Amino acid sequence: LLLAVMSYNSLFLGTVLGFAASALLVASIVLPSPRPSEPRGVYDRTTRGIRIYLATPRLRGLLALNLAAAAAGAMVLVNTVVLVRGSLGLSESALAWTMFAFGAGSMIAALVLPRVLDALPDRPVMFGGAALMVATLVGLALTVLGAGLGWSILLT
């Protein structure tokens, strides 16, 4: 929303200051020393986390849901500028309002979701959200292809 009233350079400077303050806060904490663990090889240390993740059935399902959410989030972050500025030829202000709409939608979902989860079980809500994200991305892809824009406009 701030992009509608200030330049992105000023907003970027504020973001830099926020990250620097966060880094100072993180650096100021003292963590307990970890217990020494048994020595492991490079391959074992590198792949241990994903092996544990894939060996746990609940975590495999969670991985699939996270991939669906990541695909939708990546579409918003990567292609919004291309679609709003390039394909539609709109201004930077329109891009800011578009990003505001995405953020507002996320905030509304975050505020409404606890009440929804009080009324419905977790799994149907999560799988319904994932299905909605996948259907939306497929619909967008079909719309872009149907309009004759093709992949070249999405990749530039």
Image (tube, rainbow, N blue to C red):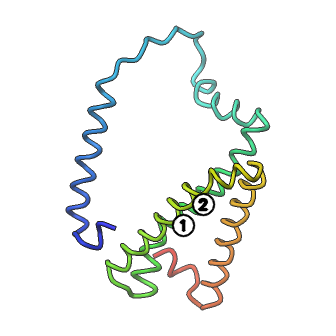
Which corner quadrant of the image does residue 62 belong to?
top right
Q: In which quarter of the image is the N terminus?
A: bottom left
Q: Vertical placement of 55 versus 66: above or below?
A: above
Picture coordinates of residue 91 (x, y %)?
33, 83
User: Going by the image, does 76 lie left or right of 17?
Assistant: right
**What x and y, as percent, mark residue 48?**
64, 27
Q: Residue 5 falls in which quadrant of the image?
A: bottom left
Task: Report which quarter residue 85 is drawn in.
Answer: bottom left
Label 2 sits on residue: 71
Q: Residue at x 21, y 55 (%)?
A: 13
Residue placed under numbered mark 1 in the picture: 75
For this rendering, which residue is in front, 14 or 49? 14
Give the CA separation, mark 2 to mark 1.
Answer: 6 Å
Q: In which quarter of the image is the C terminus?
A: bottom left
At label 2, which amino acid type do we have?
Answer: Ala
Numbered tag placed on residue 102 in the rendering: none
For label 1, the crowd category at 10 Å Cα-Cα, with few meaning under 14, some 14 to 19 and many 20 or more, is few
What's the amino acid at mark 1? Met
Asked whether the beta carbons under mark 2 and mark 1 sit within 8 Å of each other, the answer is yes
Relative to 63, residue 125 above or below: below
Q: In this view, does 79 lie above or below 88?
A: above
Number of other residues with Cα within 10 Å of mark 2, as a class: few under 14, some 14 to 19, many 20 or more: few
* Residue that appears at 66% across and 65% down: 133
Say whether residue 120 is left or right of residue 143: right
Asked if residue 137 lies left or right of residue 12, the reply is: right
Element under disc 2:
helix
Badge 1 marks a residue whose secondary structure is: helix
